[in-house]
Image (cartoon, helix red, strand yellow):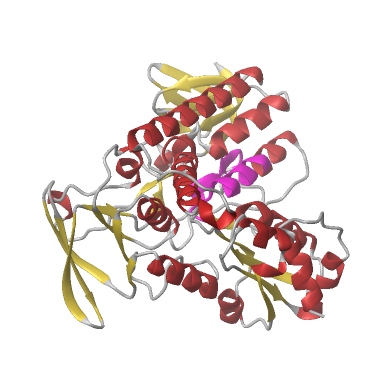
Amino acid sequence: MKYQVAIIGGGPAGYTAAEAAGRAGLSVVLFEKRALGGVCLNEGCIPTKTLLYSAKVFDTARHAQKYAVATAEPSFDLAKIIARKQKVVRKLVLGIKSKLTGCGVHIVTGEAVIADKNHVQCGEEVYECDNLLLCTGSETFIPPIPGVESVPYWTHRDALDSKTLPQSLIIVGGGVIGMEFASFFNSLGTQVTVVEMMDEILGGMDRELSALLRADYAKRGITFLTSTKVVSLEGDEQAVRVAVENAGGPAVLEAEKVLLSVGRRPVTKGFGLENLDLQKTERGQLCVDSHMQTSVSGVYACGDLTGFSLLAHTAVREAEVAVHHIAGVADEMSYRAIPGVVYTNPEIAGVGETEESLQRKGIACRTVKLPMAYSGRFVAENEGVNGVCKLILGENDVILGAHVLGNPASEIITLAGMTISLGLTAGQWARMVFPHPTVGEIFKEACAESR
């Protein structure tokens, strides 16, 4: 069987590439050894957001009096929250399968192994292809902490499926995944401790806003230990002890459960990648050009495998670029305006440069910072809650970055991303007509403040 495009991996990069190639009239085969949707849909982006929304509704119900609404004492059913999450995932997986089938994509379930750039084997079948797309995603990284082999730790998968609520939880890692789970369990009443090796949570996000989010959650009862190294783990099903060290000296923390969330790494083994002899960077990542093509003609790498972004929306765009190149459509990948979002409550989102990243590059900038209260819609919907909008301006007031703490940051950050992609100045952005009242008007207010 011969196809114009063969794709290994059915996550955001893989299924986007398959759909795009199918719509372009190309013959496509997609290999996925588990479920379509990959980590993002089955055990990452969508499941966590489903849980977080339930937690947000519970939070809103508990504070309904802020909005002059009287309710009985709110409660939640964790088993039903998990069941709802699974229902949402099943629905979306079926939706992806339906779309791919409608585009003529041949879906093969099983472990694909690369023989060479034009041949892929799955089971007893060998599939021939003109172009090969590698979209194998990433996996949870388990740090080599002494004692980790003998401790019943959680990964994000376990946290997503647990139908019982731990009274206490230690989260090792204050990145995006760690903070989202910290938010979820804190809302449901678990005593949460976050241990982070760096001196601030959410590395890569705007540092000032990350600190404000941490302070907000500290008021809600989460304990944060930054600049803290985990030395060892020990324990059993009843309790886990985490030995840590920081400037204050050694200490031992104890909780019912421990969640390891220190990051993810690209999946590079188990599918014959070594048979392609692809060029790699000094850090061991695959080299790709602006079309997502590797050093071997006709072989493309998209998504987490490149090790660049590890974000689903980045993977989607990379897949579009790769298929466009195969189909002869002019397109190039740009990473200048990739949004980052943390779906805590409140959300935090950013796009483009931060003050810290520009400082490292030696690029001069100035910032404009406004309370979210400058938006009437924000005040109306976020009673008694503070928030911040920050714009990073470069030479001639070109927008280089934008960062928001406050709901719904995830929904409005794309406005800033488009502005950065287009290379607009604050003055040009301010001339855009924003509907009133909307939270997005905060950007217009910030642009006006920059004059």
| 92 w.r.t. 174: above or below | above
Is residue 288 shown left or right of residue 397? left
Q: Is residue 300 magenta?
A: yes
For the point 18% across and 54% down, which residue is it?
148
Find the magenta span and give its range. Answer: 297-320
Q: In which quarter of the image is the N terminus?
A: top right
Instruction: Check the image and report above or below for 226 versus 145.
Output: below
Horizontally, residue 330 falls left or right of residue 354, namely: right
Left or right of 20? Residue 288 is: left
> Is residue 28 one of those drawn in magenta?
no
Q: On the image, which quarter does residue 352 sit in?
A: bottom right
Q: Quadrant of residue 251?
A: bottom left
Residue 67, percent from left and from top: 58, 54
Q: Which residue is located at x 38 percent, y 40 percent?
A: 76
Left of 292 or right of it: where is 434? right
Question: Foreground residue, 17 or 129?
Answer: 17
Q: Where is residue 163 in the image (x, y as percent from the top left)?
A: 29, 37
Residue 79 is situated, as x and y percent measured from the top left of the image, at 33, 33
125 in relation to 226, above or below = above
Q: Can residue 271 be seen in this view?
A: no
- The residue under the point 61% across, 34% down is 17
Q: Can residue 159 be seen at all in this image of the molecule? A: yes
Foreground residue among 418 and 14: 418
| Above or below 199: residue 89 | above
> What is the count of numbered marks?
0
Write the residue at 48% across / 49% down.
56
